[in-house]
Amino acid sequence: MPKRLLAVLLLVLVPLVSSCGLIDYYFLPPPEDTAQELFESGMDYMKEKRYSRASENFLKLKDRYPFSPLTPKAEVALGDAYFLDAKYLEALDAYKEFETLHPSSPQIPYVLFQMGMSNMNQFRTIDLRQDNVKEALEIFYRLEESYPKSEFSEAVKQNIYKCRKILAEHEIFVADFFWRTQQYGAAWNRYLFILENYADVVEFKDYVRKRAEYSYFEYQKVLSEEERERVQWTWKRLLKWL
């Protein structure tokens, strides 16, 4: 081929090749990140405290690579990202999903602990329903029973007491309402319930007992003799171990 003809062909082909590259760049979708890239990028966002971006990466990894060895790590990290971002309900759902999918994972003690903390951190005020605190208590009991030698054992004991204290305070709030509104029978029964079920929460024991005694004496004034004997028996039974 004559050199002049070759030069002409090159001049024609080079722009065409370049234009194909430009077309690919602007119109074809970019290649997807690998599982490793998504995980590492998510962990980098975690270090930078950019938890929303981190959770986006971990969700992508879960959706695109469900069978990757990194997926279980990403599932736990997703819960952590939500937790550190104070999205405790989302964190709880993420940890629960991990427990369901990987019940024999060595990460389960950590995941259970985080589930308990996600519930505890949803506590707001003592006058509201305490469903989250009750669930946290159940989880901590399960963790204590199933993994008594875990690294979280001491923290679990402390959090069990914190949960029980919150629940006792809630019961006192209700009992005090009955007491203030002179519903002494309901108040007395509620105070008795606290003394029987939260005896370990010693901070409130004297207060609750005094209120129970007052409610008892006011309550018996409106009872028949038969009812009064029944109430006295219940009170004496309780006094035996107080």
Image (cartoon, grey):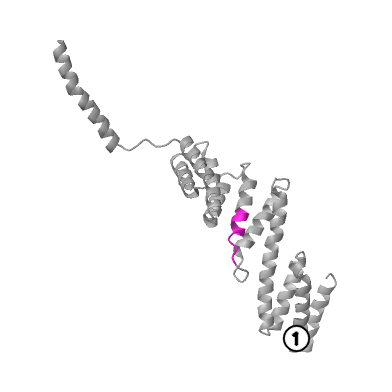
What percent of the width, then of the height, locates residue 186? 69, 80
Q: Classify 124 as above or below 230.
A: above
Q: Image check: 30 left or right of 51?
A: left
Q: Which residue occupies the foreground of this view, 192 or 237?
A: 192
Q: Tell me: residue 149, above or below residue 220.
A: above
Amino acid type at image mark 1:
Glu
The C terminus sits in image quarter: bottom right
In percent of width and height, residue 160 lies at 70, 58
**In magenta stretch: residue 31:** no
Pick whichever, 145 or 16, lies toward us: 16
* On screen, residue 78 above or below 179: above
Q: Main secondary structure of the magenta part?
A: helix
Q: Which residues are magenta?
A: 115-124
SS class, disc 1: helix
The front one of 82 and 184 is: 82
- State the residue position of label 1: 218
How many labels sit on residues? 1
* Residue drawn at the location 51% of the way across and 45% of the way down: 48
Quarter of image, res 208 = bottom right
Residue 118 colored magenta? yes
User: Seen from this angle, which residue lies furthest top?
Assistant: 2
Q: Residues within 10 Å of mark 1 (few under 14, many from 20)?
A: some
- Is 188 situated left or right of 38 in this image? right
- The spot of residue 18 in percent (x, y) is 24, 28
Instruction: Quarter of the image for the N terminus: give it.
Output: top left
The reply, left or right, for residue 69 in relation to residue 219 is: left
Q: Identify which residue is drawn at 64% across, 62% down.
A: 134
Measuring 70% from the left and 75% from the top, which residue is drawn there?
A: 190
Residue 55 position, x and y percent, is 48, 47
